[in-house]
Amino acid sequence: MRKSIENAFPHVITGKCLEVETAPGFELFDSPIPPQRCFIRRNHEQERHFLVRNPSQKPIHFLAIDKCLLNDDAETHCDCALFDEQTFCFIELKDAGKRTRKEHRRKAYQQLKATILLFRDKEIFQDVTAIEAIISFASKDSYPVRTSSSADAALMFEMECNARLLEGNEKIFE
């Protein structure tokens, strides 16, 4: 899969958009200052926005998408992705700031969908068994709150993108 990404987006190598991590756990950080992109959190002074659990310590690839792999100002793609040999997981990190969760969900849905469809067009998913999309709110609140509208959105997302739509602040790679 890594090779497919490098072939479809050759600048991924020079732009340092793709990293591999084997730690049992690591965190993602969405920087608010330029270049305003996602990183693997290396400095404990940075906020933690997303937790990745990797109990088997296998190679997990981190792909910075917004402002790295795709560097336009259209804001029609998600922040980052994580993947191993079987699962490709797109992530959109939302700040629980001025907008409501409903507004954030609607925008995140569109960003995730556009990114997945772009990757499908570039034939990135040839060997993938599962595609996931996670909307993550940067809050310490316990969630997700399951509503009928979020269940409907998840079903629609599955039909439109052939991907599972989730909400949460962590991903576990078994």
Image: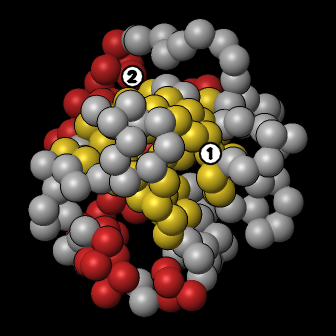
Give the crowd class for mark 2: few <14, some 14-19, many >=20 residues within 10 Å. Answer: some
- The count of marks equals 2
Q: Quadrant of the C terminus?
A: top left
The foreground one among 123 and 96 is 123
- Which residue is depicted at the point 23% across and 30% down? 155
Q: Which residue is mark 1?
A: 28
The answer to which quarter of the image holds residue 14 is: bottom right
**Left/right of residue 121 with respect to residue 80 in the rendered view:** left
Can residue 105 be seen? Answer: no
Q: Amino acid at mark 2?
A: Ser
- x, y percent for residue 108: 51, 44
Q: Which residue is mark 2?
A: 150
The foreground one among 132 and 53 is 53
Q: Earlier in the sequence, mark 2 or mark 1?
A: 1
**Left/right of residue 38 with respect to residue 157 in the rendered view:** right
**Left/right of residue 83 with respect to residue 39 in the rendered view:** left
Q: Amino acid at mark 1?
A: Leu
- Which residue is depicted at the point 71% across and 36% down? 48
Q: Secondary structure at mark 2?
A: helix
- Which residue is depicted at the point 12% across and 62% down? 127
Give the crowd class for mark 1: few <14, some 14-19, many >=20 residues within 10 Å. Answer: many
